[in-house]
Image: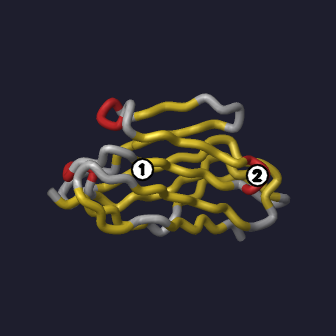
C-alpha cells in the first residue's frame, strides 16, 4: 500500500517562509507527477504547484515567484519551499502523486493534509 506523508506545516508571520515535504512510501516503481494542492475554508481545492518526473513544473499564478517545487526521485519525495508568505496562503496543503506504479496497480494518491497558517 502506498502512503504519502506530509510534514512542515505550521504558523508563520506574513513575509516568512515554510518548507513542506511529502514522502511516498511503499513498493513503488515510478511516479509520474507529484504536487501540492491547497484548500482554504469555504473554497475549492486548488493546484499550487506540480512537478513531473522529468522536472517540468507548473505553478498557480498566485504563487509564482514565491514558491518553488522540487523533487527527489530516488526518495519519492516532493518539496515545496514557500517564501514571502501572505495571509491568503493560509490553507490545508495536500500532497498528491499521480500515476503511481506498483507491482499491482497504477493509481493516484493523496496525503492527509498539513495546515499552513500565515498571520498578518
Q: Which residue sits at x=60%, y=51%?
A: 78
Q: Which residue sits at x=31%, y=53%?
A: 16
Residue 83 position within the rendered picture, expressed as x and y whole percent measured from the top left: 37, 45
Secondary structure found at label 2: strand
Residue 57 position within the rendered picture, expressed as x and y whole percent measured from the top left: 55, 31
Secondary structure found at label 1: strand
- Say left or right for 50 vs 52: left
Please, is residue 45 above or below residue 27 in the view? above
Q: Residues within 10 Å of mark 2 (few under 14, many from 20)?
A: some
Sequence-earlier tag: 1 or 2: 1
Alpha carbon of mark 1 to alpha carbon of mark 2: how far?
Answer: 21 Å
Q: Which residue sits at x=74%, y=56%?
A: 75
Residue 3 position within the rendered picture, expressed as x and y whole percent measured from the top left: 64, 68
**Along the line of sight, which residue is nearer the eye, 91 or 80?**
80
**Along the line of sight, which residue is nearer the eye, 16 or 67?**
16
Q: Are marks 1 and 2 in contact (CB under 8 Å)?
A: no
Q: Which mark is residue 68?
A: none
Q: Quadrant of the N terminus?
A: bottom right
Q: Which mark is residue 101?
A: 2
**Residue that carries the numbered disc 1 in the rendered image:** 37
Image quarter of residue 4: bottom right
Q: Residues within 10 Å of mark 1 (few under 14, many from 20)?
A: some
Q: Quadrant of the C terminus?
A: bottom left
Q: Nearer the viewer, mark 1 or mark 2?
A: 1
Q: Of all residues shown, which one is farthest toward the left?
A: 120
Amino acid at each position: 500500500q502506498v502512503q504519502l506523508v506530509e510534514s512542515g506545516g505550521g504558523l508563520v508571520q506574513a513575509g516568512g517562509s515554510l518548507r513542506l515535504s511529502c514522502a511516498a512510501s511503499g513498493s513503488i516503481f515510478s511516479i509520474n507527477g507529484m504536487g501540492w494542492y491547497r484548500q482554504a475554508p469555504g473554497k475549492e481545492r486548488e493546484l499550487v504547484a506540480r512537478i513531473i518526473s522529468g522536472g517540468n513544473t507548473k505553478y498557480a499564478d498566485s504563487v509564482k515567484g514565491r514558491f518553488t517545487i522540487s523533487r527527489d526521485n530516488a526518495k519519492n519525495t516532493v518539496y515545496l519551499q514557500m517564501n514571502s508568505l501572505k495571509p491568503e496562503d493560509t490553507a490545508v496543503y495536500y500532497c498528491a502523486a499521480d500515476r503511481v506504479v506498483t507491482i499491482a496497480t497504477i493509481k493516484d494518491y493523496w496525503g492527509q493534509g498539513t495546515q499552513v497558517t500565515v498571520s498578518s
